[in-house]
Amino acid sequence: MHGDDRIRRLLSNPDIVLVSGYARLPDAVASHSQYERLGVVLAVDMSDGRIVAADSTLLTDLAKDFFRALVEGSSVAEDTSGLVQRVQERYAGHSGGALTTALRRCAETYQQLRDARGAEQ
């Protein structure tokens, strides 16, 4: 699913929230001159923590697609450390450290939202 249809599907489910995380890029990375920080954005289903869509500010489409394939379908609620470890093991690009830091920050934001929702109930 692409473009507007994908967004409509995400918006039609009120349990899906968008979380983001950022981390400083190393100076030696090509995209550092364009972006000083790397961003990760996840659409997460609050009911189970499942990542239903992912994006990043990685420079190339291949890197973005590879990251997306590594994380979509995984749960930030159940196994954040396993998810981060999978990215560390499979993504050997120079931005890897910033990528996993930004991913951890997304997971932390999800946890905060989940805890806040639990406290409201």
Image (cartoon, rainbow, N blue to C red):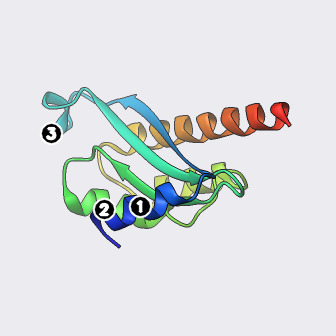
Give whichever of 110, 67 is nearer the camera: 110
Q: Is residue 55 left or right of residue 61?
A: right
- Residue at image coords 14%, 31%: 34
Give whichever of 107, 84 is nearer the camera: 107
- The crowding category of the residue bearing disc 3, from other C-alpha atoms within 10 Å (few below 14, some 14 to 19, many at least 20), is few
Question: Mark 2 belongs to which amino acid?
Answer: Asp
Q: Which residue is mark 3?
A: 30
* Residue 75 image position (x, y, % from top left): 64, 58
Q: Which residue is mark 2?
A: 4
Mark 1 touches mark 2? (CB < 8 Å):
yes
Using the image, determine if residue 61 lies above or below residue 80.
below
- Residue at image coords 42%, 55%: 54
Q: Is residue 18 left or right of residue 117?
A: left
- The crowding category of the residue bearing disc 1, from other C-alpha atoms within 10 Å (few below 14, some 14 to 19, many at least 20), is few
Question: Mark 1 belongs to which amino acid?
Answer: Arg
Mark 2 touches mark 3? (CB < 8 Å):
no
Question: Mark 3 belongs to which amino acid?
Answer: Ala
Give whichever of 52, 16 is nearer the camera: 16
Residues at marks 1 and 2, CA–CA distance in whole angstroms:
6 Å
Q: Which mark sits nearer the N-terminus, 1 or 3?
A: 1
- Residue at image coords 60%, 41%: 107
Q: Residue 62 sits in which quadrant?
A: bottom left
Identify the secondary structure beneath mark 3.
Answer: helix
- The crowding category of the residue bearing disc 2, from other C-alpha atoms within 10 Å (few below 14, some 14 to 19, many at least 20), is few
Identify the secondary structure beneath mark 1.
Answer: helix
Q: Residue 73 sits in which quadrant?
A: bottom right
Q: Which residue is mark 1?
A: 8
Q: Quadrant of the N terminus?
A: bottom left
Q: Quadrant of the C terminus?
A: top right
Residues at marks 1 and 3, CA–CA distance in whole angstroms:
34 Å
* Residue 21 image position (x, y, % from top left): 46, 35
